[in-house]
Amino acid sequence: MRAANRPLVVAALVFAATLAVFLPAVGNGFVEWDDPFTVRDNPHLRSLGGDNLAWMFGTTYWGHYQPLVWLSYAIDHAWSASLLGSGGQPAAYHATSVLWHAVAAALVAWLGLLLLETAAPPRVAAFAAGTAALVYGLHPLRVEAVAWATGRGDVLVSVFLTFSTLAYVRSRRSARRATSWFTVSLVAYALASLARGSAITFPAVLVVLDVFPLRRLGGAAGWSTPAARRVWLEKVPFAVLAAGFSVLAVEAKASVGSLTPLAWHGPLDRVVQACYGLVFYLRKTLLPLGLSPIYEIRLPLQAVQARFLFSIAAVVLLVGLVWIQRRRWPAVAAVAAAYALLLVPVLGFGQAGNQLAADRYATLAAIPVALGCGAGVAVLLRRATDARRRAIHLGVVAVLACLAFLSVRQIGVWRDSDTLWTHAARQSPESSIALNGRGWVLLQAKRYGEAEACFRRAIALQPTNDKAHENLWDLLREQGREEDLIEALTSATRTFPDLARAHYLLGVALMEAGRPAAAATAYEAALQHDPGHVRARSNLGQILLDQGDAAGALAHLERAVAADPADAVARNRLAVALDRQGRRADAIRELEQVLRFDPDNRSARDLLRRYRTEGH
């Protein structure tokens, strides 16, 4: 193999192997876990028009600033509509994610070869770089990001961050084109940041690279020499980008209220969670068994649990060992530092959501770990006899085959909502979220008894799981169990006293049960917490109308129509209230407005005919 072609050949082989293993993901569907909101039913992804592009680059929808991800989804919709005749097919989104992931693995191979080419013979470097890339690309911890349509951001950020690293290393190895490669590195980092906020610690990773293997900082290079100061200065544009995107990431989380307050999850608890995450991802990398779509966090965190105490002890021990041996094992120290730095954004310091950890969170941190594995293979091969070299080759192939097998099996978990939530409930039987997901699947299958058991268990484990409450309400309503529904809603209003929707639905259930006075009280509670709740105000107006209080009904119905002029039900009721107040001409005008919005509204048409007939 010619030296000039070696990177291309190794990268192509890695690309092909990764593509082959992850290809089954193309046959997966969307799953009822974020996919409907982010991809399947998102109207802003239906075209690449100016309004949609403005939305993509301006929104913090779903708690992320990720314009590149939204753009990639829109492109998927466009090409699938053009080639498949129907946009929005899940196969299109999954195919793109698989392709991007294969590209990321190929880039890891290229980067590995670039880092190892001066430290090992060409063939050894090529095999070790390929090993590193396949350890990264075929690992089952990558499945969540690739096989879940909503996980696209983690795939894209790995592509652009790896390419940014590669370009940075090339800029240090090529004096003639240093400026060009440095610019490419900076642009690639900006693209990574536009894909996911988890790239914010990358400037610190570049510092680690400058210490080892580039040796531009520390040691003989020093930390504050003129040459070292130039190295520090190079990081300024990266740091500026990181600071800006850090602000955007925090604002995005805050905009949807997903940031966990310090009062609920204090600084010490977050440090404990971070220690757990550092050990968790390392453990799952070394032994990727028992993977789950959800590792739920319970607050307040019980820091004295054995798993947390073990994690703290393990982190202290490992950090101490790496620090003591940093000069003897500089490569190990560099890998450990890069691993920890890339995990910092997802370790819980800025806890958002209900996950203690997630498989996809390890996507970036896995890159230095994989490169470290490749470097280890290179060291072993360089010193091995022919017999041992063959044994190492067979051992690597065996490990990669195991990883590929586990990934294919894990891809099947994400095939559809049924397989996803069945697996999640099996792996995490004490997870309220997993049980609620499983219950939802059973509810769609009309297996009411099993679904109800899941919902009630989910609520018992986590009383504030609003989704489980809402699914239980839907189940009871679908079965026509009025009293059980009223009991469940009444309990929910105690758990969520500020949740207007619970009070409103309780009012609806009480009305259907023929208890208008109690329903009025529930609607008033809903309006206390959400004065703009149009249906609660409209229904309360109807109760007052039925009670003969036309003036009270009129006040509520006028506010309901002002809040939503297109609400035909509220306008019809307002017309009746106006007529009872002796204002038939105003009532007729309201009904005419209804028919402008909804020409086929039979109720409005009948009332209008009656009022006009009686008027003559």
Image (tube, rainbow, N blue to C red):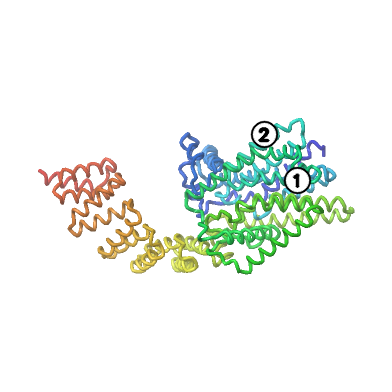
Instruction: Please state the horizontal and vertical placement of residue 377, each as a whole percent of the image.
Output: 80, 52
Task: Answer with left or right where residue 271 lies relative to residue 500.
Answer: right
Task: Answer yes or no: is residue 21 visible.
Answer: yes
Q: Which SS class for mark 1?
A: helix
Instruction: Please state the horizontal and vertical placement of residue 556, each as a whole percent of the image.
Output: 25, 52
Disc assigned to residue 211: 1
Q: Which SS class for mark 2?
A: helix
Q: Please name whichever residue, 319 or 398, is drawn nearer the observer in this view of the structure.
A: 319
Q: Nearer the viewer, mark 1 or mark 2?
A: 1
Residue depicted at x 67% and y 37%: 185
Residue depicted at x 81% and y 50%: 378
Task: Answer with left or right where residue 513 lies relative to residue 297.
Answer: left
- Relative vertical location of residue 526 with respect to residue 196 in this rendering, above or below: below
Instruction: Please state the horizontal and vertical placement of residue 528, each as a whole percent of the image.
Output: 32, 57
Tell me the CA gap for discs 1 and 2: 21 Å
Instruction: Please state the horizontal and vertical placement of residue 607, each as a whole percent of the image.
Output: 19, 48
User: Contact (CB < 8 A) between labels 1 and 2?
Assistant: no
Q: Please name whichever residue, 526 or 393, is drawn nearer the observer in this view of the structure.
A: 526
Disc assigned to residue 221: none
Q: Please name whichever residue, 333 or 165, is drawn nearer the observer in this view of the structure.
A: 333
Residue depicted at x 64% and y 67%: 309
- Relative vertical location of residue 531 with respect to residue 206 in this rendering, above or below: below
Kindly identify the amino acid type of the residue bearing the numbered disc 2. Answer: Thr
Determine the image quadrant of residue 123: top right
Q: Residues within 10 Å of mark 1 (few under 14, many from 20)?
A: many
Kindly identify the amino acid type of the residue bearing the numbered disc 1. Answer: Val
Residue on which disc 2 sits:
183
Mark 1 and mark 2 lie on one chain; the one further toward the N terminus is: 2
